Amino acid sequence: MQRNEFAKALTRLQQEILKMGSLVEENITNAINSLAKQDVQLVDKVFMVEEEIDRMELQIEETCLRLIATQQPMAKDLRKIAAAFKIIHDLERMGDHSVDIAKVTAQIGKEPLIKPLIDLPQMARQAQIMVKDALDAYVTENVTLAEAVGTADDVVDHLHKQIFRELLLLMMENPRTITQATHLLFVSSSVERIADYATNISESVIYLVTGKRIDLNQ
């Protein structure tokens, strides 16, 4: 493979990762909407999209391995492929957490919600923005944007703690809310983890550009 063809292969790799990321963003939205609207049809859609996310992870992984084996890349080109490996794993884990949220929707069914879902959708939107910004930083190799994703994670952490306090108070006041409140706490934890994985992607971007590994969660 000539240098020009290798560059094109790296570009195609990046495009595939963005496509996978778009599916993950879609699944985050569908998962949280399935809960907020108690829409079981959206649950089925989340499961279907997750299958495609898993398929893409394996496909991209094979592409990365083939490029390493045939091109023996060095320096930044090698970091690009290493970052791709890490990013697709983080995206796949986000997809898993979206499925976890959808499973909670199925468990709750049409049971009346113990509280209006305000903070959870807000938290999910913030996490989704983080995913988009992290992928944008990846495409543009923008370290400043990648670092901003780490800062945005503080907002998600704050909302998670707030939701935890509110649900804990509900459980203390009315033991009959414990089962559903536990489910909603699980959803909040899943969203918080999605945001953490978005931060991981940003760390991969910084490594790709600078060759330095940093922890944005500190």
Image (cartoon, rainbow, N blue to C red):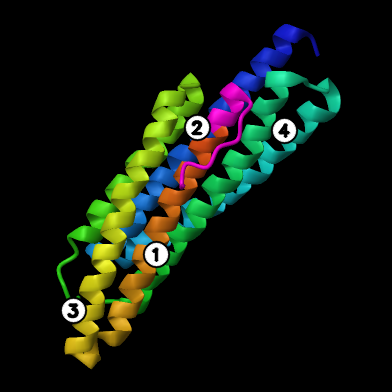
Q: Nearer the viewer, mark 4 or mark 3?
A: 4
Indicate the secondary structure of the residue bearing disc 2. helix
Would you name the residue on which mark 2 appears?
18
Residue lying furthest front:
218
Would you name the residue on which mark 3 appears?
112
Q: Quadrant of the N terminus?
A: top right
Residue 216: in magenta span: yes
Q: Which residues are magenta?
A: 205-218
Q: Nearer the viewer, mark 1 or mark 2?
A: 1
How far apart, in angstroms, are the residues tagged by discs 1 and 2?
25 Å
Indicate the secondary structure of the residue bearing disc 3. loop
Per the rendering, the mark at residue 54 is none
How far apart, in angstroms, are the residues tagged by discs 3 and 2?
37 Å
Q: Are marks 4 and 3 in contact (CB under 8 Å)?
A: no
- Upstream in sequence: badge 1 or badge 4: 4
Residue 103: in magenta span: no
Would you name the residue on which mark 4 appears?
64
Horizontal and vertical percent position of residue 210: 59, 23
Residue 113 placement, left or right of 178:
left
Look at the picture and state if 84 lies above or below 143: below
- Decide which of 47, 78 is in the foreground and name it: 78
Would you name the residue on which mark 1 appears?
189
Amino acid on which disc 3 is placed: Pro
